[in-house]
Image (cartoon, rainbow, N blue to C red):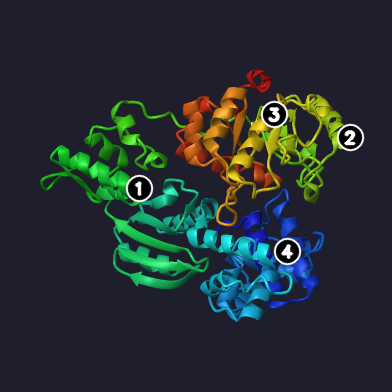
Amino acid sequence: MFISNQDIAALLSRMAVLLELEGANVFRVRAYQNAAALIDKLPHNLADSKQEDKALTGLPGIGKDLAGKINEIIQRGSFRQLEELEARLPKVLLELIKIPGLGPKRARALWDNLSLQTVADLKAAAGKGKIRGLSGFGPKLEEQILQGIAFYEANPLRTLWADAENTAHELCSYLKQIKTVAQVEAAGSFRRKKETVGDLDILAVCPQPELVMQTFLRHPHVEKVISHGSTRSSVILRSGLQVDLRVVLGKSFGAALHYFTGSQAHNIALRKLAQQQNLKLNEYGVFRGERQLAGKTEAEVYQQLGLPYIPPELREMTGELEAAAAGKLPDLITLNKLRGDLHCHTSETDGALSLEELALAAQDLGYEYLGITDHSQHVTIAAGMDEKRLRRQLKAIDQVNAKHKDIVLLKGIEVDIMDNGKLDLPDSVLKELDFTVCSIHSKFNLPEARQTERILRAMDNPLFTVFGHPSGRLIGTRPGYAVNMEKIVLGAKERGCFLELNAHPQRLDLTEVYCRLAKETGVLVAISSDAHSRQGLDALRYGINQARRGWLEARDVLNTRPLGELRKLFKR
């Protein structure tokens, strides 16, 4: 079972939220918050080696009690006190805190004052104007709560791909320990690299299916068994994720993998194609009459139907069958094509690593360059930099570059786009940089026309290089701001700007739709990590998933260019 620092931090943050819901002492809440923030930014993974409580208590703010909980998380993926607290809190409170804009204090106040039993009760109360009269609320907040409920209702509970990956890999590794298991792979929307997954489908090949099923049901994270059969079982994990396991024959593994990978629309179209050739395609293989022609691998399934192999990320019925038939499938981007990363933060603002530490980390990753893009002064919560501090950092970057010959730190900044379209720092200092990442961190609620105009006006500045996390969304918790992305893509093309695909697993911003639009328009996309820690640099692979779903090739991506060419592209 792999547990990352981010997993540990997420559980400690969850504990802080639930304690606040329960009305716990503020210092106890803050202890969990501070521990989560610390662990999220540690340069080494706590679970890589067994941690003694004594070693953990050497970390700032980590006492014996917290150290024990951290070790319990490493050993079993959760800790008892969190599970007990979740069990005793009213279920409606646990639902209310999922609504964007409702923190623990407000959720508790609404529950206390309105006797809520469900989210529907809250919606009804807001609709009748009952919230605005409560102390600390008001008409504007009531309207925001209604908007948050609408977002909550439109976004059912799903698991981020990055979180599902940990579960999928751990379960597959667990099943591979059975000596007679020949193949194991996760299918479904997880294999198609969707941003989120509703459940996991796992396929296995083994001559002893009952042994596989019994081993699966004994996994320590299984909380509830939904069904148990000789070749298929379904369970609910402690995390709430449903996992379905199927044992199939080796001669049908490829066909089953294709069938359970989907998408449904892609599968239906492929079955129709088979019928046109007097063939039958199902989860067991490709058949002519009763004779199986293919099924052991996915490649032979496609080949039997006269098509090249179509990567799972493209199987959404958005033109992949036509492109395959015409021999025009894209040569999808892979992680090893990236020469560097163009968005990361240092300890000068809200990052965990110094310039020197980031240079060494990037060097270890084999990068040719790394863009340093700390926040600008408007983002006060992240200790954003003013003109004086930025110039001091530029001198420090020169010193690090003089010391390291195998990596180049590029001089950049994540500069805020103000609501009037101006950039947060004067041109006199921005022109000293190699490039800028220009982002929105405020005034998310502007009308679409004004938001779009704001961005285009910022792009008019010749010192605007890359538009950072273009929609501003946080998957499952915050909708993006209203903006006409078609106009933004066209505006970037006309002005010689670039768009970021922010690889943070909760952002994945651009969506695959706009990645493809950028490709078709001729706008290069920067796949960037937005790293705030050493582990954060590894997020580039999540961006690669999204880029592949958007049909991007290496030639469509800005940071596949060598440094010399990149510098030329930066000069609008």
Residue 262 placed where, x, y %?
34, 48
Mark 1 vs mark 2: give the one in front: 2
> Which amino acid, mark 3?
Phe
**Amino acid carrying mark 1 in the image:** Ser
Classify mark 1: residues with Cα within 10 Å, few (<14), some (14-19) or many (20+).
some
- Report, in whole angstroms, how far the alpha carbon at label 4 lies from the one at label 2: 43 Å
Q: Quadrant of the C terminus?
A: top right
Badge 1 marks a residue whose secondary structure is loop
Check disc 2 and give the amino acid type. Lys
Residue where numbered disc 1 is placed: 263
Which of discs 3 and 4 lies nearer the camera? The answer is 3
Circle number at residue 431: none
* Residue 388 circle label: 2
| On screen, residue 139 above or below 360 | below
Q: Say which label, 3 or 4, has the lower sequence index.
A: 4
Name the element at disc 2.
helix
In this rendering, does residue 4 appear at all?
Answer: yes
Query: Residue 287: horizontal and vertical position, in percent?
Result: 16, 44
Camera-side mark, 4 or 2: 2
How much space separates mark 1 and mark 3, taking CA atoms? 39 Å
